[in-house]
Amino acid sequence: MSQHGPDEAQPLIRALPGRPSRIFAVGDIHGCVKEAEALLQHLRSVEGLGRNDLLVFIGDYIDRGPHSSEVLSLMIDLRRALPQAVFLRGNHEDMLLDYLGLGGSSGEMYLENGGAECLKSYGLHPFTPRDDIIAALPPEHLAFLKGLELGASLAEFVFVHAGVDPARKLGEQLRRDLLWIRGDFLHHEHTLGKTVVFGHTPFEDLAIHLPFKIGIDTGLVFGNKLSAVELVHGRLFQVARGETGVLTYELRSRLGG
C-alpha cells in the first residue's frame, strides 16, 4: 500500500484495499520507544504478525517522551519489513511540520506541547533555528513525517488520529477535526455506519462505545500504558510504562462480558 502525503490531492480518509487476516491498531507512543519495541516484538514473534495482516498506527509517535528520534527510526524499520502497514499523522507530527515550515498547522504551539523533548532526542536545543533543525534531522525521518496519512478505512472500521465530526459524512470531514477534535466527537454519536478507531485523547483504559468508537490512547507517556487492539478476533495487547512485558486480553473483557 502506498503512502500519500495528506497535503496532496488525495482523499483525507483513504479506502484500503484487500481483506487482511487480522487488523491491529496501535495507540499513541509519544517518544516511549522501549514500550513500543516490546509491543512490536511480541506481535511479531508471539502473535506472528506478518504481511497478511494490517497494522495501523494512529499517530503521535513523537513529543513529550524522551526518545522521539528512536521511535521514528523504529517505525521506518518496521515499514521496510511490513510495507502494507499504515502510519497516520497525529496532531504532534502536524505541529512539528508546521514549526519547520513544511506544511501542517499550529506550529506556534509546538514547543510548549512536548516538542522540546523531541528536539532534545536529536541532540538539539529547543530554540535551534529552523534551518538547523531541518539539516540535523535524518532525511528519512523528514520523508516519513511528510508522508503520514490523515485517515484510512477498511470494512467496518475508520482509523483517524483524533476522531470525526459527527455532523459530517465520511468524505466531508475536515483536516483539523481528524487531527484535533475532542468534545463534539467524544460526546456524540455519529452516523457513518463504521466504528471509528482513534487516539489523541488519553484514557485510563480503552474507551469503547460500540458500534461508534474505540479510543486506544491509554496515556503511555503520562505513566499509564501502550495499547494495541486486534479487531478481527477481538484481542487487546498492553505494555505498562517502564515495563517490557506484554499483557494480552480478550476485548470482550472490556465490555463487561
Image (cartoon, rainbow, N blue to C red):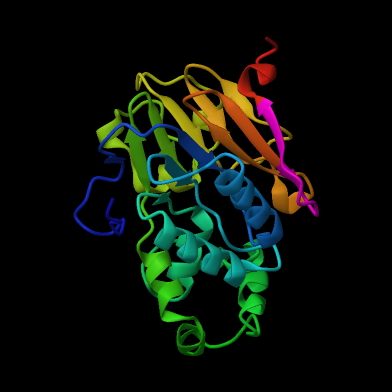
From this view, report whether residue 42 is shown above or below residue 135. Answer: above
x 57%, y 39%: residue: 47
Residue 240 within the segment the image draws in magenta: yes
Identify the image quadrant of residue 8.
bottom left
x 72%, y 53%: residue: 221
Of all residues shown, which one is farthest toward the left? Answer: 9
Q: Position of residue 20 (x, y in %)?
A: 36, 34
The answer to whether one can see residue 8 in this image is yes
In depth, the one of 190 and 222 nearer the eye is 222
Q: Position of residue 107 (x, y in %)?
A: 49, 67
Q: Give the residues drawn in magenta, as a range.
A: 239-249
From this view, report whether residue 253 is shown above or below residue 186. Answer: above
From this view, report whether residue 78 is shown above or below residue 240. Answer: below
Q: Position of residue 124 (x, y in %)?
A: 63, 85
Identify the image quadrant of residue 120.
bottom right
In depth, the one of 190 and 69 nearer the eye is 69
x 63%, y 28%: residue: 207
Q: How many marks?
A: 0
Residue 75 within the segment the image draws in magenta: no
Image quarter (top left, top right, bottom left or bottom right) of the C terminus: top right
Q: Position of residue 158 (x, y in %)?
A: 39, 33
The answer to whether one can see residue 106 in this image is no
From this view, report whether residue 43 is shown above or below residue 78. Answer: above
Of all residues shown, which one is farthest toward the top? Answer: 257
